[in-house]
Image (tube, rainbow, N blue to C red):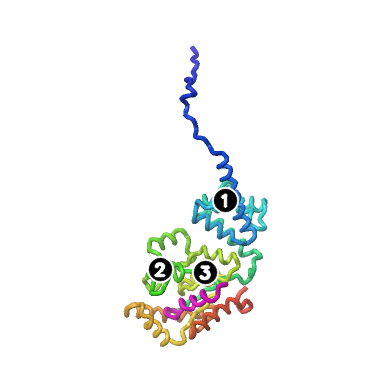
């Protein structure tokens, strides 16, 4: 015997009604979103923003216009990338065409960043051949911070990277300007997330590291970039980016270095002795560097550093 199953009849008056949709408002919102994405794509196409900057914004703010852009339309907005190259890049990155910048995982973001960085290094942007990273390093108390501050205040065309550190601010230092002061937990997170170009423990006490994203964006935009870091960091950067040029800042004499360290009064006696012992080893590393600048006068030393960055024909290497 065959049984016919039928759905029970439902009174239309009892059926829940879906909420009314303001189609006009939804249409306006969609148009506004398209215009916002178009504005970002125009900024990339005209060079007002670098692709790396847009990618980093998308990663930092998942609700931003940049985050809602599809990777495909993002790539197509980059000069010299057409449909064929875009398709090849998406296949190389193993990404779905529906993927949005804000939906990329950490590894996908890093893979895309590497592709963009590689393209920037081979593109015809202004100053491409000499678009190198420069590092200013030297022994403790030699005046690296004072010289870099003078450069920041008087040479706006130089992008000066700001290091992250776990030590406390000294008198007169400003967070985000002199250093990015973070906790040990936050520093651990930055290391784990791959946000640092290099990191090291200095004087067996505090950790320092260089955020990578601002450097990549500045280099891609053709800017002169200077890092003021310790000697361990300089070595690490050279390993990661072999084209980096290293500048060693020297004191006029050992006695002057001792005078500066004791005179600034920011460390106790035990810390001063520890730093002086470290300084002896650091001074022995000067021959590893491409250039040497003696810091007798801050303004003159800063000028010499900037001149080295500008002296294209004097820069060793390719």
Of badges 2 and 3, nearer the viewer stands 2
Of badges 3 and 1, nearer the viewer stands 1
Q: Is residue 208 left or right of residue 315?
A: left
Q: Which mark is residue 254?
A: none
Q: Mark 1: few, some, or many residues within 10 Å (few <14, many ≥20)?
A: many
Residue at the image point whose x is 45% and y is 72% from the top:
232
Magenta region includes residue 48: no
**Residue 91 appearing in the image:** no
**Residue 121 appearing in the image:** yes
Q: Is residue 260 left or right of residue 125?
A: left
Q: Earlier in the sequence, mark 3 or mark 1?
A: 1
Quadrant containing the C terminus is bottom right
Inter-mark Cα distance, 3 to 1: 34 Å
Residue at the image point whose x is 41% and y is 68% from the top:
165
* Count of number-bearing discs: 3
Inter-mark Cα distance, 2 to 1: 36 Å
Q: Earlier in the sequence, mark 2 or mark 1?
A: 1
What secondary structure is found at the residue carrying circle 2? strand
Q: Mark 3: few, some, or many residues within 10 Å (few <14, many ≥20)?
A: few
Q: Which residues are magenta?
A: 139-157
271 lies above or below 254:
above
Can you give x and y, in whole percent of width and height, for residue 291 in the image? 54, 80
Per the image, the residue denoted by label 2 is 207
Q: Which mark is residue 239?
A: 3
Can you give x and y, in whole percent of width and height, for residue 128 in the image? 63, 68
What secondary structure is found at the residue carrying circle 1? loop
Q: Is residue 173 left or right of residue 44?
A: left
Residue at the image point whose x is 38% and y is 64% from the top:
183
Inter-mark Cα distance, 2 to 3: 19 Å
Per the image, the residue denoted by label 1 is 69
């Amino acid at each position: 015997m065959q049984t016919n199953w039928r759905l029970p009849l439902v009174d239309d008056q009892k059926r829940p009604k879906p909420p009314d949709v303001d189609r006009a408002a939804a249409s306006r919102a969609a148009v506004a979103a398209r215009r916002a994405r178009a504005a970002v794509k125009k900024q990339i196409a005209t060079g007002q923003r670098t692709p790396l900057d847009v990618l980093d914004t998308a990663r930092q703010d998942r609700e931003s216009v940049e985050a809602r852009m599809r990777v495909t339309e993002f790539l197509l907005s980059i000069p010299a990338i057409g449909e064929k190259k875009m398709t090849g890049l998406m296949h190389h990155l193993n990404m779905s065409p529906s993927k949005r910048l804000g939906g990329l995982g950490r590894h996908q973001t890093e893979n895309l960043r590497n592709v963009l960085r590689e393209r920037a290094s081979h593109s015809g942007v202004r100053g491409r051949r000499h678009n190198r990273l420069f590092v200013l390093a030297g022994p403790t108390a030699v005046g690296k911070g004072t010289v870099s501050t003078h450069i920041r205040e008087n040479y706006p065309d130089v992008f000066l990277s700001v290091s992250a550190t776990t030590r406390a601010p000294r008198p007169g230092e400003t967070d985000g300007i002199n250093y990015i002061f973070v906790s040990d937990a936050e520093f651990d997170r930055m290391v784990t997330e791959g946000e640092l170009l290099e990191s090291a423990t200095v004087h067996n006490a505090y950790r320092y590291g260089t955020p990578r994203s601002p450097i990549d964006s500045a280099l891609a935009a053709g800017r002169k970039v200077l890092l003021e870091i310790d000697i361990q960091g300089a070595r690490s950067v050279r390993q990661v980016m072999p084209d980096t040029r290293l500048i060693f800042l020297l004191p006029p004499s050992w006695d002057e270095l001792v005078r500066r360290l004791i005179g600034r009064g920011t460390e106790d006696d035990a810390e001063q002795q520890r730093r002086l012992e470290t300084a002896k080893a650091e001074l022995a590393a000067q021959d590893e560097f491409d250039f040497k600048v003696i810091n007798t006068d801050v303004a003159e030393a800063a000028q010499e550093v900037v001149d080295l960055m500008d002296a294209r024909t004097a820069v060793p290497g390719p």
